[in-house]
Image (cartoon, rainbow, N blue to C red):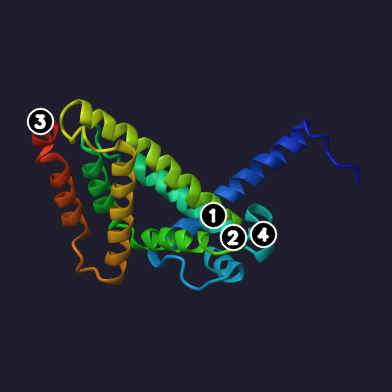
Amino acid sequence: MAQPSPGSPRARGSYAKGIAMRQEILDSAIEVFAQRGAGRTSLRAIAEEVGVTHAALIHHFGTLEQLLVEVYSESARRLEREHPVPGGVSPVERMRLSAERNHGVPGMVQLYTSLVATALEVGHPAATAFATERFAQARAALTEQVRDAQASGRIRRDLDAGQVAALVIAASDGLQTQWLLDPGVDQVGALAMLDRLLTDRAAEGDAG
């Protein structure tokens, strides 16, 4: 049977159906992982949970690692759209508010931590690319926010903005891991304290 040409109505319809099916799988997978995180699983187990065939998952996502990256990335985008962090807050306050928001989806927090850990291992290109790009983007965005806060006198000007950004991310991720292991760890409170350490003595730091 002759294959439809790329620009034919039949080909466009098939492409649209493929996109829709991929999104349906992603939606279902997000619901699954939001509840239980990554855990020890396989594409076959996920296919059974989301109600599709193993072949369908391979066709649309290729590997388990790529599926997990896309599940987390899509979930994070949705969370930001539905519960955006307000503007005008300090860089640390932004991370604190994000931490509060993330507490509502512990499965996704666990998935993120698992992806970052996987990225440190050899032979995991999708996780490594995800973590490397995410940290780079987060550092760049926070560095600009730190500079804005320094210009307005809310953070000491004698601190290197890039180093502050890296420290804030490290504190947030490290506290998040501790919270996963022990929900009694006050992640939000510790970030609030870091915010005070960077802001309460801003004027004194400028004077020095």
Type of the residue with mark 3: Ala
**2 vs 3, front mark:** 3
In the rendered view, does 199 fall on the left or right side of 96? left
Mark nearest the camera among 1 and 4 is: 1
Q: Disc 2 versus disc 1: distance between alpha carbons?
A: 6 Å
Whether pointer 2 and pointer 1 mark residues with C-beta atoms closer than 8 Å, the reply is yes
Report the number of numbered marks: 4
Q: Residues at badges 1 and 4 in contact (C-beta under 8 Å)?
A: no
Q: Quick one: 196 or 86, which is closer to the camera?
A: 196
Residue 26 visible in image: no
| Extreme residue toward the front, this view | 208
Query: Mark 2 or mark 4: which comes first in sequence?
Result: 4
Residue 95 is at least partly visible in this image: yes
Q: CA distance from mark 4 to mark 3?
A: 60 Å
- Residue that carries the numbered disc 1 in the rendered image: 128
Disc on res. 124: 2
Q: Is residue 67 left or right of residue 110?
A: right
User: Label 1 is placed on what type of residue?
Assistant: Thr
Mark in front: 4 vs 3: 3
Gap between marks 1 and 4, in whole Å? 20 Å
Which badge, 2 or 3, comes first in the chain's sequence? 2
Type of amino acid under label 4? Ile
Binning the other alpha carbons within 10 Å of mark 1 as few (below 14), some (14 to 19) or many (20 upward) gives many
The picture quadrant where one finds residue 110 is: bottom left
Residue closer to the observer: 34 or 169: 169
Alpha-carbon span between mark 1 and mark 3: 43 Å
Give the mark nearer the N terminus: 1 vs 3. 1
- Tag shown at residue 58: 4
Q: Quadrant of the C terminus?
A: top left
